[in-house]
Image (tube, grey):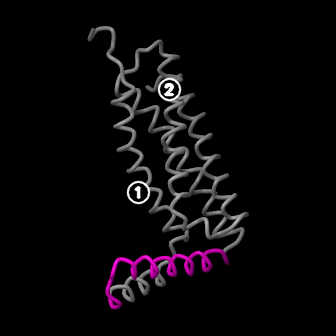
Amino acid sequence: MVNEIIKRNGITFGIITGVVLSLITALMYALDIKLFIAWWTTLLSFSVFIIVPIVSLSKTKKELNGVFPFKEAFTTYFITAVIGVIISVAFKIILFNLIDPSVKAMLLDLTIKYLISTSEKFGVTASSLNETVLKLKETDPYSIVEQLKGSVFNIFFCAILGLIMAAFFKSKSPSQE
């Protein structure tokens, strides 16, 4: 059974993570959809998965009086991350598939233009680039299925990040000292 403090903080900070990521998405949508392909917005979203869980882990460790074994630290981070991913993906699914499905086509065009310009800078062959563009046009990266697939990858990535953070935040139990 999960400790109540771990559960409470994981859920609370998971909701905060999801809301912050959803607000970032909403701001990008409202301000300029070109922000969806900007490298720094990806970095901003990634930083949310670092900063909010650090606060969550710090608070949880303090509330547990410094006794924070690896498993509990990882569980706290993982609950936070999974809830954050679920809220964020749900918001994107609603935005791109119910509220404004036309944005998907605009984002696909922007992505293809960005891919072409970037590939040309790195000397990618025209045939390889054409193949990649065709594959991209055949898929709908903002569909419900693709968003859910992406969320699985995000959760896996968060699990790895959670292992690293748990190792950093863990403390020895009193019996190990």
| Residue located beneath label 1 in the image | 153
Residue beneath the point at 47% across and 12% down: 65
In which quarter of the view is residue 122 placed? bottom left
Identify which amino acid the numbered label 1 is placed on: Phe
Is 113 above or below relative to 157? below
Please provide percent x and percent y for residue 108.
55, 78
Residue beneath the point at 46% across and 84% down: 138
Screen quadrant of the N terminus: top left
In which quarter of the view is residue 9 placed? top right
In the image, which residues are magenta?
A: 102-127
Residue 10 in the figure: left or right of residue 28: left
Q: Residues within 10 Å of mark 2 (few under 14, many from 20)?
A: many
Identify which amino acid the numbered label 2 is placed on: Ile
Q: Observer-nearest residue: 46 or 143?
A: 46
Residue 122 in the figure: left or right of residue 17: left
Q: Which mark is residue 6?
A: 2
